[in-house]
Image (spheres, helix red, strand yellow):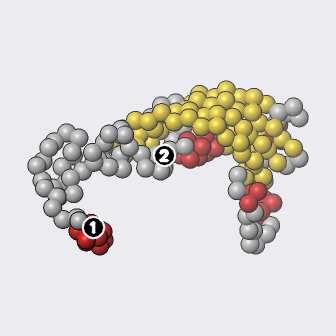
Amino acid sequence: MKIIVSEIPDEGMDLDITEQIGSEAVKITSPVHAVLHIKKTGAEVMVNGTVSGDVELQCSRCLASFPLHVESAFDVVYDPAEAVARDEHHELKSDELDTGFYKQDTLDTDELLAEQLILSIPMKPLCSAECKGLCPVCGADRNTTDCGCEIKEADPRLKVLEQLLKKKE
């Protein structure tokens, strides 16, 4: 959904959006639901609200695809992109890290919602907390198969600790 910034009323506007959006970074598998409050102060636009939707991720341990429901609350400030374009080199300050930019008097909520969903995805997505991952020897999925491989070699960086245990005994 595109919002014309100059048409935002002085008291702000509330939106309840449910729509299918796309993203190159993650597969969004359900319509995204968002409740937004948009307020304009001069050229600056403040957007706060919540977003939720289902995404398809790949488990970091076993590489299986799995669905995840993601919810996020956010508070973002948008400035016109033209203001930054005037500066040849614009260095962001710490208070500008939550700042986005809109172009030609238009704010695209699809980009905002996709961005907020992506930011809510865990750094290391797991299909379950009990996921056993892949066998380091044969590559079998330990969640579905007991491959029987024996892992004899310990991490070579831990050999020093093994020697300390032997001295203690």
Which numbered marker is on residue 43?
A: none
Q: Secondary structure at mark 2?
A: loop
Q: Amino acid at mark 2?
A: Pro
- Front in this rendered view, residue 169 or 62: 169
- Mark 2 crowd level (few <14, some 14–19, many ≥20, 10 Å Cα): few
In the rendered image, the residue lying farthest to the left is: 148
Task: Give the CA distance from mark 1 to mark 2.
Answer: 41 Å
**Where residue 28 sits: x, y (%)?**
47, 38
**Where residue 53 sits: x, y (%)?**
52, 33
Residue placed at 48% from the left, 46% from the top? 122
Which numbered marker is on residue 122?
A: 2
- Front in this rendered view, residue 161 or 21: 161
- Front in this rendered view, residue 117 or 166: 166
- Residue holding disc 1: 168
Quadrant of res 85:
bottom right
Q: Amino acid at mark 1?
A: Lys
Tell me whether the residue at label 1 lies in contact with that at label 2, contact meaning CB atoms closer than 8 angstroms.
no
